[in-house]
Structure formats: C-alpha cells, structure tokens
C-alpha cells in the first residue's frame, strides 16, 4: 500500500535558484515550503501561479485567484511583498507549465524550482522536465508535505483514498495527452 503512494513522489533536493514558482492549489502547505526555501536562501523571488477562482472564497465575497491566495499566505508567513509576484495564468498543471515556460523565455531565466504537493511531484516532473530541457531551462521539483494526506497510511482515510486515486487518474491523463 505504501508503494502506491511512494511511486507518486519524485522530488529533487532544493538548490540555489533564480526563482521558485508555486503552483496553484493547496496554498497553505505550498506557501510554507516556499517560505522555507526563501528563508533558507535558496531563492530571492517567489512567483505564485494560477488563474482559478476558488468557489469557497467567492461564496465569502472574496474574489481572488489561486495565485493571489498563495501570495496572501506567503505574506502572512513574513515573506516580503517585494519578493512575491503573481502570474495569474493557467488553470491546470499543463497550462501553468506553458505560462511559466513563456515567462522564463521572456525573462531569460535558465534555472527554476517548482513547488507542488509532495504526492504530485511525479506528474509535475512529467509535465515540466522535457519541455523545459528543450529550452535549456533547468527545473527542480520540490514537494511540500500535505496537511491531510499521509503517504504511509493513505488508505486509512477517505481523503487519502480519494487523493491517491485522483492523482493516479491525473498522471494517466497527462501520459496519454
């Protein structure tokens, strides 16, 4: 059972980089990891991606994108506003990768790190690595621990079961797309 979860994890060790991009979704856990990278000197700039408008926040009258939500989480963790940028593009990992590639080419950036949920790292790697390597951009994939998903006992909760199943479906989808 643990092997099913461990297969999904395919992350790199962080290194000094030009920019850390935080993919949309799970802003709390991903912003904690990005803050850790920033505070430990691995980067000087964090870019938050995502154009989706989370419906839960819209119901509260807060109309913000996932990128803006991640930025808010970063500022609450004391990352200076001057070190954060929002790239409000992309509603999927694939679309975000296209937006990030365009950004890197325009700004002549050749080394980045991508923060996503730890159990998403195999899929994120499959989307980013080859297309960025073709443009001579080095990509490191950094996994953020998930708040509600435990790799070593995912089968013991409904959330874990759904999260693992969903990730395998997405991985398969990206393989055939």
Image: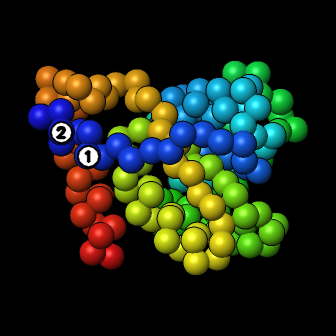
For the C terminus, the image quarter is bottom left
Up the image or down, 139 lies above or below 10; here it is below
Structural distance between the alpha carbons of marks 1 and 2: 6 Å
Circles 1, 2 touching at the beta carbon (< 8 Å):
yes
Mark 2, Cα crowd under 10 Å, few <14 / some 14-19 / many 20+, is: few
Mark 1, Cα crowd under 10 Å, few <14 / some 14-19 / many 20+, is: few
**One can see residue 8 in this view:** yes
Residue at 23% across, 25% down: 152
Q: Which residue is mark 2?
A: 3
**SS for callout 1:** loop
Up the image or down, 44 lies above or below 97; here it is above
Residue 87: which disc? Answer: none
Residue at 14% across, 29% down: 155
**One can see residue 162 in this view:** no
Up the image or down, 35 lies above or below 128; here it is above
Pinpoint residue 73: horizontal percent, then vertical percent.
65, 29
Q: Which residue is mark 1?
A: 7
């Amino acid at each position: 059972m643990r092997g099913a979860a461990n297969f999904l994890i395919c992350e790199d060790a962080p290194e000094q980089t030009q920019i850390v991009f935080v993919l949309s979704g799970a802003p709390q856990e991903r912003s904690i990891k990005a803050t850790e990278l920033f505070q430990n000197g691995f980067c000087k700039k964090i870019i938050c991606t995502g154009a989706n408008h989370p419906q839960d926040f819209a119901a509260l009258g807060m109309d913000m994108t996932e990128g803006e939500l991640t930025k808010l989480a970063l500022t609450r963790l004391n990352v200076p506003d001057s070190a954060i940028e929002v790239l409000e593009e992309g509603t999927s990992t694939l679309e975000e990768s296209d937006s990030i590639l365009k950004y890197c080419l325009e700004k002549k950036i050749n080394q980045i790190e991508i923060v996503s949920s730890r159990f998403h790292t195999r899929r994120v790697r499959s989307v980013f690595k080859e297309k960025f390597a073709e443009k001579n951009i080095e990509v490191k994939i950094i996994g953020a621990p998930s708040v509600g998903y435990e790799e070593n006992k995912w089968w013991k909760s409904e959330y874990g079961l759904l999260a693992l199943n969903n990730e395998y479906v997405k991985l398969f989808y990206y393989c055939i797309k």
